[in-house]
Image (cartoon, rainbow, N blue to C red):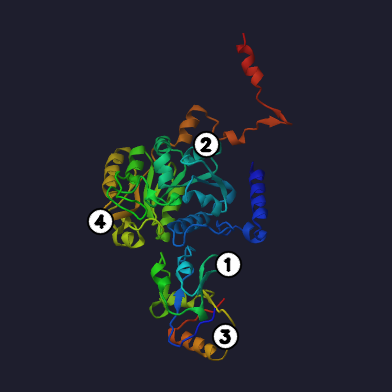
Amino acid sequence: MKRRLRLNILINILSTGCPRISVLSLKTFRAPKNPDWCPGCGNYGILSALTTALSELKLDPSKVVIVGGIGCSGKTPHYVFANGVHTLHGRAIPYAAGIRLANPELTVIVTGGDGDLLGIGVGHFVSAGRRNIDMTILIFNNQVYGLTKGQASPTLPRGVKTKALPRPNIQDAINPVRLALASGYTFVARGFAYDVPHLKELIKKAVLHKGSAVIDILQPCPTYNDVFTKEFYTQRIMKLDDLKDWDPVVRAPEEADEKMLKAWEKASWGDKIYIGVFYQNELVPTYEDRVSERIPLYKKYPPAKIPISVDGKPLASISHIIQPRII
Amino acid sequence: MAHEAKKEYQKVVIDQDICISCGACVAVCPVQALELDENAKARLIWDVCIDDFSCVKVCPVNCIWPTSQAPPEPKAKSKWYRFNAPLEGELKNTFEEWKKKYNVTGSPA
């Protein structure tokens, strides 16, 4: 498996025509490919924070998997020098869950937009919180469907009219932080795409967190969103770390409700928009722990490490399983 | 692209360590005085810049300043600017004066 991953990386390097030595020294996670997002897009800030966070954590690129959905945000796996999967619309989380459960050694990061993860994929988003699989979910939240010419997305508030809408939005908005808290995510944070050093620290914390982590990243769309712009955010954004006595970490099970209520209160969307870690609880067992309770050897022999064939012959024989049942 | 290099142009200063490679400045510059370098960071083409400052307003992470307002750290860094053509005659003097006036110690790429 390890050899195959390394081989894949080598093939990747050869096919992209990048100088081999400089890439194999792996100082950076930036892939040798120029992103085709619009100039000034918030995605560049997120990509920059993600790649620096990964290299500062000194992770092995062959052990990192970036899973992207559909949308401008879904292209992120192409621009990160690690294993990447570009999946179906809204289904990035199920893919990531499968990858992580098959091989718990991997660091799995989901990159999806608000339309992808909170629109078509909202069912998977809620379910992932219930399972608490150890992975990181980054929501690129720009309030519009940028790739399809700027329609209203699930995070656009009611009554707001962005450039491409003929009339103001008729639906209410989802608050991603509150939805994540309600779904049972054990690390919930909000970041700002243009505050790269702050976002980088958030991503590092989320990757190191044991359990499902979600970061709602406020990302201005300079092409289609003329309401939630850089100026709008810079006037309103406040840091949770600057508040007195702000401690989002749950250290005893009885504290959980109180800390969640405080996080819920601060997650509101108004004249003040808080960024930082809202809630962190490592006392909830992860899905990997829950599986190993039932299958004690799961962590030692996860599905990815079990050989399925020897000398070309499969180890499991279906005929042996169905033979006794044939009448 | 040749533009008249006036002495009073103060140009801009870029901090490539803050730059997120978004290319907003490159897209907005009316005289193509900015480019993305080999690391995809913004770089100034010194002799083309005409003090338009659209790039300063448009930069999402505020890593571009008019030279007179720039902090000292990026001025000491190197390779954030280059020349369109080798400097000759009066232009060379203008460059030396600019360097001295704004205390720019970094070298060009």
Q: Position of residue A136 (x, y in %)?
A: 45, 45
What residue is shown with label 2? A98
Q: CA distance from mark 3 to mark 2?
A: 59 Å
Residue under disc 3 on the same chain as residue under disc 4: no
The structure residue drawn at horizontal position 57% and vertical position 59%, both measured from the top left corner, is A27
Q: Look at the image and tell me whether residue A290 can be seen.
A: yes
Q: CA distance from mark 2 to mark 4?
A: 40 Å
Q: Chain of mark 4?
A: A
What residue is shown with label 3? B87
**Closer to us: mark 2 or mark 4?**
4
Q: Position of residue A138 (x, y in %)?
A: 44, 48
Name the kind of residue labelled 3 in the image.
Leu
- Of the pair A270 and A2, the residue shown nearer to us: A270
Name the kind of residue labelled 1 in the image.
Glu
Residue under disc 2 on the same chain as residue under disc 4: yes
Q: Is residue A302 above or below residue A207?
A: above
- Of the pair A226 and B55, the residue shown nearer to us: A226
Q: Residues within 10 Å of mark 2 (few under 14, many from 20)?
A: few
Secondary-structure class at tag 1:
loop
Mark linked to residue A142: none
Locate residue B66: give its quadrant. bottom left
What residue is shown with label 4? A271
Describe residue B4's horizontal placement relative to residue A243 as left or right: right
Question: Mark 2 and 4 residues: CB-CB less than 8 Å, in contact?
Answer: no
